[in-house]
Image: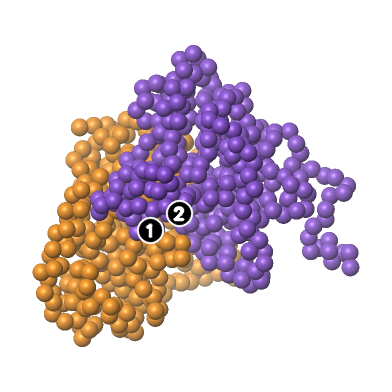
Amino acid sequence: MQEAMINRAKQLLADGTVNRVIGWKRGEFAYDITPAVFDSADELDSDFVFDDFTAANVSKYLVKESKKEGKVLAFLKPCDTYSFNQLVKEHRVVRENVYIIGIPGGPKLDAEKIKAKGITGILGVKNENYTLKIDTVYGEETMPFYEAVLDKCASCKSKKHVVYDELMGDEGDVLDSDRFDMVEKLENMTAQERYDFWREQLSKCIRCNACRNVCPACTCEKCVFDNPASGVENKAPADSFEENMFHIIRAFHVAGRCTDCGECSRVCPQNIPLHLLNRKFIKDINELYGNYQAGEDTTSRAPLNDYRQDDCEAGIVHERGVE
Amino acid sequence: MLKISLDKLDKLFEAVSASQTLYIPVDREDGAAEYKKYESGMKLSSALNTVRSAKDFFFPQTENLVDFKMEGKNIEVIDVREESEDFVIFGVRACDARSFTILDKVFLCEPVDSYYKNRRDHGTVVTMACTRPAETCFCGTFGIDAAAPEGDAACYSDGESLFIEAHNEKGQKFIDSVASLFEDGDTAKLEAVREKTREVLKKLPLANLTTDNFGGDKLNEYFNSDKWGELSESCLGCGTCTFVCPTCQCYDIKDFNTGHGIKRFRCWDSCMYSDFTKMAHGNPRLTQLERFRQRFMHKLVYFPANNNGEFGCVGCGRCLSKCPISMNIVKVMKALEVK
């Protein structure tokens, strides 16, 4: 696949369809892939990579890239196409300036899960019939492929590309995923148990903002939390509850716009399952307004941006009012 | 050397924690390790390193410096400092141990940062030699021997016993306080383990990375390098690298209106952030390129220029495994280096 992608990219560069390519660049190890823009065939040949570790969603980079001179070729996995579409819907990317090739999705691997097995000194990782053969300075190790799959891929919602100019590989379908199972589990907890769960998770936060900065739904030019004039800007919490508020406020802000791409949890250095906050909103929206998938299209009105007279009146306040 | 059987470690921890606060790295449910205040039953993590570095103990992410209380036209200045009590950090790796030396250069030079010094004076650092370094390790680049860590006292494991030796008075005092648990031990097997670790260190993928072509005299060469654009192009501008880094030492001081008074606090800052070193006219580093460049120039050029050639990195590898886009000091050094 990687070779076919490089060849196609070279063609599109050569015939002038695009003047650069956004994809993934090889790193020092088997897994440390960096999103990168390639300007030439030589660069593609030497550095372009597409493998089990190319999980990064490059859609958000297109906010900036699509405003530059000329067309950019973007290779988008199914989940990435939802993010891209949502950005089109919000007028954050210039669709005409992006040439999209839909490529097959994951499951992609999480190097942290390999390391969590105590496997270290990793020199190379090979997938042989869904067994990972890992070459290390301490000798060869093996582990089942599926035990190293990223959480976001383990509960994949769709193998279908919702936007593309051309496709490489087979097109897939929207999947029945188990992505709301953990949300349900949390819903079934008592308020105290749920509070304890989130306090434990969110207290790990080091406020590095990686979740916000990687999030394709977080594209404000100046985040309120970075703006000294906002009065709520802070690099440090005044008390231990503030980190929780940061994440809850962020989840509210992306509610109805989050496509569940899972990047927030993938990049969290402290392994906080932030996607569960977003999934709770998605599940509630599905239940209260009917199934809605952000990024599925670019024209429909999103439930939370729309008003209809028969809209549900969810919430404790309304229920009390009925009594 | 004095030794204690590894299965008696809990006795050691109990003894230490009876007289002072003890912090050890423990495994979290999600597989990561973090320093925790020791409580009975906790097990020492075998992880190579914690996600957050050990710098937190001396340079916490946030701390209150002073409170102000206004009554009418009077402002009362309240010193909120509490004299630290003695504490022990056990199981610090060689890289983190060296980071304290680097932080000392910043906080203990004139004018001495008394908040930092207070904690430094009361903390005893007991290190633990590495036996299973990772591919992301490159402490050797900075002259650190993972098999012979610094610290007030150092521990070594041969798989059966834990050996301990003091490096200074503070370390000796620590050993004396728990000496009854230790016995004299034969270090033959230990030497073999240390030798094996050093062999592994030589085989690591970053073993040949050197600082030979970096330092205080390379300012214009690297500052004006045309590589920064490409290197910083996909940087998210988050603060992960700076916050997991054991040597990043920049901080911000702000006043917070609590409604009842003012708290002046200090917190970690990140050169990656848009309001870092913000002045009346804004941030002097307008784009992520300049912010990104600042971080690496600081570690590889400015810091050695001001500190007799010492670099602002210890090769712990945290940024290598934690950066969301896997851009890090090793990639920067390799791309930038002019031989």
Which element carries disc 1, helix, strand or loop? Answer: loop
Front position in the image: A16 or B102: A16
Is residue B329 visible in the rendered structure shown here? no
- Residue A281, position as x, y percentages in the image: 68, 53
Dot 1 crowding, Cα within 10 Å, few <14, some 14–19, many 20+: few
Q: Residue furthest front?
A: A129
Chain containing the residue with disc 1: A
The residue type indicated by label 1 comes to Lys
Q: Name the residue tied to disc 2.
A: A147
| Residue A102 shows in this picture | yes
Task: Answer whether labels 2 and 1 touch (C-beta < 8 Å).
Answer: yes
Residue A291 lies, in percent from the top left, at: 74, 47
Residue farthest to the top?
Answer: A15
Whether labels 2 and 1 belong to a single chain: the reply is: yes
Nearer to the camera, B18 or A190: A190
Q: Which residue is mark 1?
A: A117
Question: Which of the two marks, 2 or 1, is nearer to us in this view?
Answer: 2
Q: Label 2: chain?
A: A
For chain B, what colour was chosen?
A: orange
Count the labels in the image.
2
Q: Which chain is purple?
A: A
